[in-house]
Every structure is written in structure tokens, then in C-alpha cells.
Image: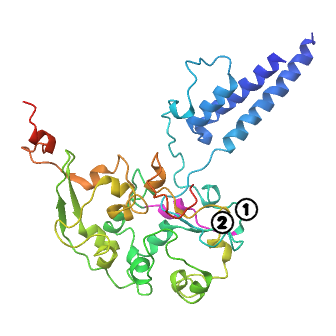
Amino acid sequence: MRQQLKTFIGSAALSLIVSLPAAGADMSRINVMQQAAAPAERLIVADVSSANTFNRNLKKEKDPNAPPPEDGYHDPENEGTHILQPPKESYIGLPTTEFGNHVDWVKAIDEKKLSPRWDRISSSEAPFVMDLDIVRPVKASVPDVVFPHRQHTEWLACANCHPAIFIPQKGANQINMSAILLGQKCGVCHGKVSFPITTKTCSKCHSKPKPADWSPPLSDATLKNPWR
Amino acid sequence: MMSYKADRSIKWRFSILGVLAGLALLAMTPAKAEYADVIINNYADAAGMRPVVFPHWFHRIRFRCKVCHADLGFQFKAGGNKITMAKIIDGKFCGACHNGEVAWSVENCNMCHSGIPGTPTHIHGSTVQRLVSPPYKALNAPQQPQQ
């Protein structure tokens, strides 16, 4: 019986490993499987709660643009799901990125690969594009932010952002990354529908290097009580 | 002690069973959905319909953000527009285009109502969802289903 169990577990693990590149399984599941398969061989250092287990095998999307029946939230039992167009079909020929929809939407318009309507009915109306860069100095040592109006006015009307989200006045908008990550300010769109906030996208906004003589501002505590 | 032959056939049977179990596990791995798709489930579940899945990618290939978010009055908030079928048939929200003139009409129920029942309203892949700890919510804030 023991032999049979070993065979069963061995072949299950083998089939998982063999089909790994083809089927695109994620590593975390494999780990779970192997742990379950060989409980006796697992070295238990200490009993820790699940919050303290070390697992940094964060899942990487294998098929980021899955067709609707396989995407995880369309109901495959619904007839209409199978009529819907798979995203990949319409992304052919569009410039790619490493994040979001894996399509560079701004570049697609710039390269005239895409020409979405500016009006519901008329295809001849063109957006009012305003080419104005706003430089926002950043207190921290990361590069300063350059906000380009041009890319934004290609897609949006002024009233979408002003004055509800951004007050159109210099110095009137306090912005920080925590607010953005929680969906305020730039985060109303970025991190939801326009390019996401990942380590790959920092430099899209933080794009203007600090001047050569820049040094980080001293904190109040240091200014009041210099350690020397 | 079993004979050599019988032992071998059982071994085979178990290994096939094992392979099948492994493949079944693989089939269960969740697939990855499209960034920025919005699942709208304000009223759908309660009305016995599947939640609506709105594909941002499909619409932005055809229209710029301004058309819906400025001209048609869609708020920048998942579930914040309180869309009902009555409003759509009235020509508001989705109904501004989905009227059989600009795009296909409302009789294609299950092309929009195509989400897995019970899925809460959210934007797929949003940063707030990917935060390791949930964002702060005041104790007296209205309860919202978490995913």
C-alpha cells in the first residue's frame, strides 16, 4: 500500500512538473502540492502562523489577456460569454507594454494605430490637445514628476479633472503616493484603468532627474536639534 | 506478497490516477482577467441576473474617455453610477449607444450580464485590490462586500 501511495504521489508531482511550461501553472500551487505530497520529508523549523510563512513566489500572470470564458470572472456557463471578443484579437498590431492591458494606448494614438472617436456619433471631431508640461518637484530623492497635458487631453476633456480632482492653480494640489495608491488624485484613473502603479511604471511620471547639486531637505527635527 | 505481474498492473493504475489528479489540479488554477474591466453588481444579483462585466479595453479602442466620462456623465467610480435597465432603455448611460443605432441594443441581455454570480462590484486589477493590507475604513462606514 505504501508503495502504491508513493507511486500515486510521485506520478502526480511528475505530471505537474512535466506539464508546467505547457499549461502555465503558477509556482505557489506546485509548492502546495509538493508540501502535501511529502509531509514526512518536510523539515519543520517552528510552528508559525500562516502570516509568518515566507512565500515571496508572487504569482506572475502567464496569460494576461485571457479570452472571456477563461478570464476568471466571466461566467463560462453563460452563452453570451462565448460571443464576446477575446482581447488579444483586437490588440494585434498595437504597441505593447509590460503592464496593464499590455498595450501602450497613448503610443497607439501617437502612432495612429488607433483613432478612437472624440464624439459619440461623429468620427470627424478632434480633441482639443493642450501641450503643456507641469513639473512637480518631489521632496524625496526620486526624480521630479512631469505631468504632460498632451497625452491626457488626447483622451479626456478638461472638465474630467478640473476642478473636481485637481484645482487648476499652482501649489493648490497636495499629492502623495499613498493617496494615489488608494485611488485619490492621479489614482482616480492610474492603477484602475490607465497605466497601473507598479515598479515598472514609476519612471513614467517620475521622469525629470534632480539637479546635480540637489540634496534631500533636512527634517524639522534635525534643523531644531542638529546632532553635532 | 503479490505476484510481480499483479503488482505492476496496480502500480500502473495508480500512476495513471496520479497523472489525472495532477492535471485536475492544473485545470483549477485561476486564469488572469483583463486589466480595467469593471464588474457592476449594484442590483443584478438581487434581480436574479448575472453581474455586468464592462470591458474598458473594448470601448477605449472605439471611443476616447471623454465621450462616456464627460458627455454621458459616467462617474469615475465603479458602481457609482447607479445604472438600471430603465435608465438604459431611456437612452441614458449605456443606452446612449446601446440602442440599436450606434451599437447593438438591449435585447442581448447576456452579452453584458455575463459575470459569475455573486462577484462584487469592483475594477479588476486595481491597485487598491492589490494592497497587502486593506485600506482604512471608518467604523461607521457602510459595509461593502470585499473580494
Frontmost residue, A27 versus A111: A27
Decide: is B105 above or below A204.
Answer: below
Label 2 chain ID: A
The answer to which of A35 and B45 lies nearer the viewer is B45
Mark 2 vs mark 1, CA separation in Å: 8 Å
Amino acid bearing label 1: Glu
Provide the residue span drawn in magenta.
A80-93
Residue nearest the observer in this picture, A174 or A149? A174
Residue A100 at least partly seen? yes
- The residue beneath circle 1 is A77
Residue located at (33% from left, 51% from top): A201
Q: Is residue A189 visible?
A: no
Q: Position of residue A156 (x, y in %)?
A: 34, 74
Mark 1 belongs to chain: A
Disc 2 and disc 1 on one polypeptide chain? yes
Binning the other alpha carbons within 10 Å of mark 2 as few (below 14), some (14 to 19) or many (20 upward) gives many
State the quadrant of the N terminus of chain B: top right
Which amino acid type is shown beneath numbered disc 2? Answer: Thr
Residue with the mark numbered 2:
A81
**Corner quadrant of residue A17:** top right
Residue B75 is inside the magenta segment: no
Is the C-beta separation of discs 2 and 1 under 8 Å?
A: yes
Which secondary structure lies at badge 2? helix
Q: Residue furthest top?
A: B1
Q: Which part of the image, by quadrant, shows the C terminus of chain B? A: bottom right
Q: Is residue B31 left or right of residue A56?
A: right
Query: Residue A154: x percent and y percent?
Result: 31, 73
- What element does badge 1 sit on? loop
